[in-house]
Image (cartoon, rainbow, N blue to C red):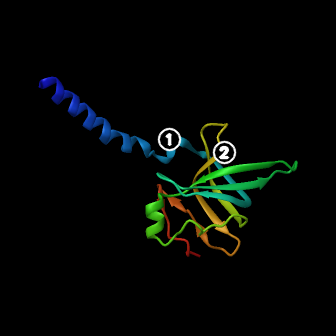
Amino acid sequence: MKQSMVSLLGAALLAVSLPASAHHAVSAEFDTHKPITFSGTVKQVEWTNPHIYTQIEVKNPDGTMTVYRVEGGAPNSLFRQGWRKDTLKPGEVVSVQGFRAKNENSMNIGQATITTSDGRRMFGQTGGQAQGGGQQQ
């Protein structure tokens, strides 16, 4: 009986800790000493938990292409702010300001703001919180 209670308690603690570990501090993945700014074309929007990612394709000076994954807020939070899966559309030209990942091989960009060609600011982050919704100018 005592062993089953310990097992149950251990399982409960594990279940509670997994969602907490899935979310991370910005500083855990991104280096605020590595700012990056670029313009490119929206390739795809990954509307998934715990964050959405916008893939942006950038043409390099040598003609090759790089695809960055720009981290945004949580889908539920963005949805409550009026954003939808098609707020940013594939083919749309955007500018990005954010921070590179600490991992040199990663193309993830965090704490980023995406600005559309008509001036709308998307996915703006301050301390991990999204600023405004898809209609902010």
Q: Position of residue 92 (x, y in %)?
A: 71, 67
Q: Position of residue 127 (x, y in %)?
A: 47, 55
Tag 2: amino acid:
Met
**Mark closer to the observer (2, 1):** 2
Q: Is residue 118 above or below residue 109?
A: below
State the mark number for residue 28. Answer: 1
Upstream in sequence: badge 2 or badge 1: 1
Tally of numbered tags: 2
Q: Position of residue 2 (x, y in %)?
A: 12, 25
Quarter of the image with the N terminus is top left
Tag 1: amino acid:
Ala
Q: Position of residue 70 (x, y in %)?
A: 61, 54
Q: Which residue sits at x=54%, y=42%?
A: 29
Question: Which of the two residues, 99 or 123, is positioned nearer the viewer here?
Answer: 123
Q: Is residue 48 above or below residue 29?
A: below
- Residue 62 falls left or right of residue 107: right
- Describe the element under mark 2 as helix, strand or loop: loop
Crowd tier of the residue under label 1, counting other residues whose Cα lies within 10 Å: few below 14, some 14–19, many 20 or above = few
Residue identifier under label 2: 107
Q: Which residue sits at x=47%, y=55%?
A: 128
Q: Which residue sits at x=43%, y=46%?
A: 23
